[in-house]
Image (cartoon, rainbow, N blue to C red):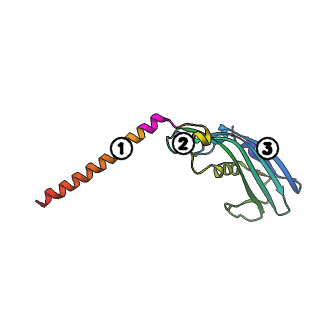
């Protein structure tokens, strides 16, 4: 079964004005998209679709929690997320290609799939810095991983020094 069929809105006969919709987004939804930054989550999505004579405005509000990976230790990280985005959908008799801002719908289309728009809203709401932080999100990094990482970095640094020394030695030896 396609997990995204719930996100298809029939638009035939929709009256001018505001139309509210509500959706739930969970793990199944995220499985449909290929993105390691966004693997799981539980969010409520409120959509207000405003139909005007020549276009539709779709305002998405997402609210909930997502699971991502920590920038520092690579461990699973749970983050609260609240974000709002607006998309404009235009009807067209010709075949236009979509742009980032405007979604073009053929004149004979009788439904609209909003799953990608919801996904984009969630992705755009992700904070750019994602890490375990006791004061920000009450979560702690995996200390074992951090220690291994710093050990590894120390080793890398000493290898660099060794490399420079051996290069210098080689240079000196060649001169003789
Ligand atoms: Zn971490």
Q: What kind of element bears circle 1?
A: helix
Q: Looking at the image, which residue is at 58% across and 42% down?
A: 68
x and y, in percent, of residue 93 in the image: 77, 64
Query: Which residue in the structure is indicated by mark 3?
Result: 22
5 horizontally vs 131: left or right: right
Query: Which residue in the structure is indicated by mark 1?
Result: 154
Q: Is ligand 1 closer than 8 angstroms to the Cβ of mark 2?
A: yes
Magenta-span inclusion, residue 129: no
Foreground mark, 2 or 3? 2
What label sits on residue 81 in the rendered view?
A: none
Quarter of the image holding residue 81?
top right
Q: Earlier in the sequence, mark 1 or mark 2?
A: 2
Query: Which residue in the structure is indicated by mark 2?
Result: 70
Task: Report the residue that reaches farthest toward the top.
Answer: 144
Question: Do the residues bearing badges 2 and 3 touch, measured as CB atoms within 8 Å?
Answer: no
**Main SS type for the magenta part?**
helix
167 horizontally vs 57: left or right: left
Crowd tier of the residue under label 2, counting other residues whose Cα lies within 10 Å: few below 14, some 14–19, many 20 or above: many
Quarter of the image holding residue 133?
top right
Crowd tier of the residue under label 3, counting other residues whose Cα lies within 10 Å: few below 14, some 14–19, many 20 or above: few
Q: Quadrant of the N terminus?
A: top right
Q: What kind of element bears circle 2?
A: loop
75 horizontally vs 31: left or right: left
x and y, in percent, of residue 128 in the image: 58, 51
Q: Earlier in the sequence, mark 2 or mark 3?
A: 3
Task: Report the residue that reaches farthest toward the front.
Answer: 135
Residue interval drawn in magenta: 141-147
x and y, in percent, of residue 119 in the image: 67, 48
The residues tagged by marks 1 and 2 sit, at their Cα atoms, a distance apart of 21 Å
> Is 118 rendered above or below residue 146?
below
Front-most of residues 81 and 31? 81
């Amino acid at each position: 079964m396609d997990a995204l069929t719930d996100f298809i809105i029939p638009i035939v006969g929709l009256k001018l004005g505001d139309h509210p919709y509500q959706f739930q987004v969970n793990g199944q939804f995220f499985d449909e998209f290929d993105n390691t930054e966004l693997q799981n989550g539980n969010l409520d999505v409120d959509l207000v679709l405003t139909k005007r004579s020549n276009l539709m405005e779709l305002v998405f509000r997402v609210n909930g929690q997502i699971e991502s990976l920590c920038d520092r230790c690579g461990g699973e990280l749970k983050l609260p997320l609240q974000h709002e985005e607006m998309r404009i959908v235009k009807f067209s008799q010709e075949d236009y290609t979509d742009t980032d801002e405007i979604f073009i719908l053929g004149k004979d289309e009788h439904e609209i799939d909003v799953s990608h728009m919801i996904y984009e809203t969630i992705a755009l709401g992700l904070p750019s810095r994602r890490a375990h932080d006791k004061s920000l999100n009450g979560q702690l990094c995996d200390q074992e991983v951090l220690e291994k990482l710093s050990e590894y970095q120390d080793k890398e640094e000493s290898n660099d020094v060794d490399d420079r020394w051996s290069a210098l030695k080689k240079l000196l030896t060649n001169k003789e």
